[in-house]
Image (spheres, helix red, strand yellow):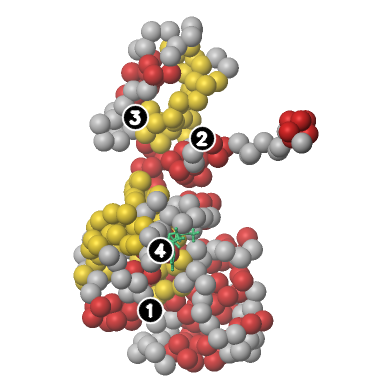
């Protein structure tokens, strides 16, 4: 089996008309740590809930651990999936020990020793009540619950929210260990692009219910670059828009280009693309720069109007209107 999750052309419409998924296709390789990233409302939670069988898609197909997602399959698959939802729905009055006992009764397999070790690692007292737990502590308890039954696949929805940097690092170490030692595939949605870049080997960028880009992280760094060009004379922007050039920004002595190599009809490598740019009369390539995951993310999903804050109302103009 090569894919732990395979999603093809998935569509989900909510009552009221919101199209949350608009033909989403993704492949999560078995054994990978896969980060699903995207803006608020991109469709990440919807995707994970469909994979858990908590929501029905309106179109398309999905397969989890080699099984097509039918209502019968999902109830059986749940024993093989560890799910940590965005907002864990635990009874506030229950103690941590009671939550564990309740969850244990639902699974034939349960690794009590490891669960206890994780609780200790996270300093989670068994006697605390759910309502006394902070947001970060709830996230950690949620992970303990998700891994306790030795699942093959972990689906974690925004797991780092509320974690302090020390706990976030511990949490990431545990995930990497779960992945490396026990071969669990981890698919997580997150806005924490630092964590995603440290953890994930594959990234899926979802935008408005569609996959904008899906790639191994190494390949993403290799193919997404910024190129600074200087121009001897005034040059229309359009001349720089070669295949593979996604964004063109004006600078003092030229332009800053955001480029993607190997993109469809684009060039095969960044070197080829810069060579072609250098052949444009009057253009000199001054430098090629790496991008981190956040910069890559922003270059795909940020619209130009969002880069500047709205201007405060002009008081003089307002006064003149009164
Ligand atoms: N129960 C619902 N009823 C109606 N619309 C919904 C419902 N749940 C989600 N949506 C809408 O579907 C879209 C996708 O939501 P979803 O929660 O999947 O996004 P997300 O990528 O997880 O966002 P975030 O990063 O903010 O958690 C959004 O426009 C959201 O408002």
Nearer to us: label 2 or label 3:
2
Mark 4 or 1, nearer chain start: 4
Mark 1 or 2, nearer chain start: 1
Q: Cβ(mark 1) to ligand 1 < 8 Å?
A: no
Residue at the disc numbered 4? 16
Asked if labels 3 and 2 touch by Cβ distance under 8 angstroms, the answer is: no
In whole angstroms, how far apart are the C-alphas of marks 2 and 3?
Answer: 19 Å
Q: Is residue 284 above or below residue 47?
A: above
Nearer to us: label 3 or label 1:
3
Quadrant showing the C terminus: top right
Residue at the disc numbered 2? 304
Disc 2 secondary structure class:
helix
Which of the 4 quarters of the picture holds residue 178? bottom left
Nearer to us: label 2 or label 4:
4
Disc 1 secondary structure class:
loop
Disc 3 secondary structure class:
loop
Residue 98 visible from this viewpoint = yes
Residue at the disc numbered 3? 244
Residue at the disc numbered 1? 150
**Which residue lies at the image location 45% right of the left edge and 87% below the top edge?**
103
**Which quarter holds ligand 1?**
bottom left
Asked if labels 2 and 1 touch by Cβ distance under 8 angstroms, the answer is: no
Nearer to us: label 1 or label 2:
2
Residue 268, position as x, y percentages in the image: 28, 31
Q: Residues within 10 Å of mark 2 (few under 14, many from 20)?
A: few
Q: Nearer the viewer, residue 283 or 240?
A: 240
In whole angstroms, how far apart are the C-alphas of marks 3 and 1?
Answer: 44 Å
Which of the 4 quarters of the picture holds residue 19? bottom left
Residue 80 visible from this viewpoint = no
Mark 2 or 3, nearer chain start: 3
């Amino acid at each position: 089996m090569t894919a732990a999750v395979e999603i093809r052309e998935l569509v989900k419409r909510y009552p009221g008309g919101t199209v949350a998924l608009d033909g989403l296709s993704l492949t999560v390789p078995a054994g990978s740590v896969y980060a699903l990233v995207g803006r608020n409302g991109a469709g990440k939670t919807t995707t994970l809930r469909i994979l858990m069988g908590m929501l029905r898609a309106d179109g398309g197909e999905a397969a989890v651990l080699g099984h097509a997602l039918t209502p019968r399959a999902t109830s059986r698959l749940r024993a093989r999936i560890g799910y940590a939802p965005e907002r864990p729905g635990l009874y506030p009055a229950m103690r941590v020990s009671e939550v564990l006992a309740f969850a244990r009764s639902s699974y034939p397999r349960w690794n009590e020793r490891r669960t206890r070790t994780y609780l200790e690692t996270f300093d989670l007292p068994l006697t605390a009540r759910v309502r006394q737990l902070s947001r970060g502590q709830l996230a950690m308890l949620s992970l303990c619950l998700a891994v306790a039954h030795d699942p093959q696949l972990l689906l974690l929805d925004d797991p780092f929210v509320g974690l302090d940097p020390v706990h976030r690092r511990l949490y990431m170490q545990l995930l990497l260990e779960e992945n490396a030692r026990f071969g669990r595939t981890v698919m997580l949605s997150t806005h924490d692009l630092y964590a995603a870049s440290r953890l994930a080997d594959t990234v899926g960028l979802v935008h408005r219910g569609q996959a904008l880009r899906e790639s191994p992280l190494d390949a993403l760094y290799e193919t997404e670059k910024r190129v600074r060009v200087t121009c001897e004379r005034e040059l229309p922007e359009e001349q720089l828009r070669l295949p593979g050039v996604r964004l063109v920004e004006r600078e003092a002595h030229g332009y800053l280009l955001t480029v993607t190599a190997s993109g469809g009809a684009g060039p095969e490598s960044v070197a080829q693309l810069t060579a072609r740019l250098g052949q444009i009369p009057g253009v000199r390539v001054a430098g090629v720069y790496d991008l981190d995951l956040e910069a890559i993310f922003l270059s795909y999903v940020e619209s130009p109007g969002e880069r500047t804050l709205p201007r405060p109302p002009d008081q003089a103009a307002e006064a003149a209107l009164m």
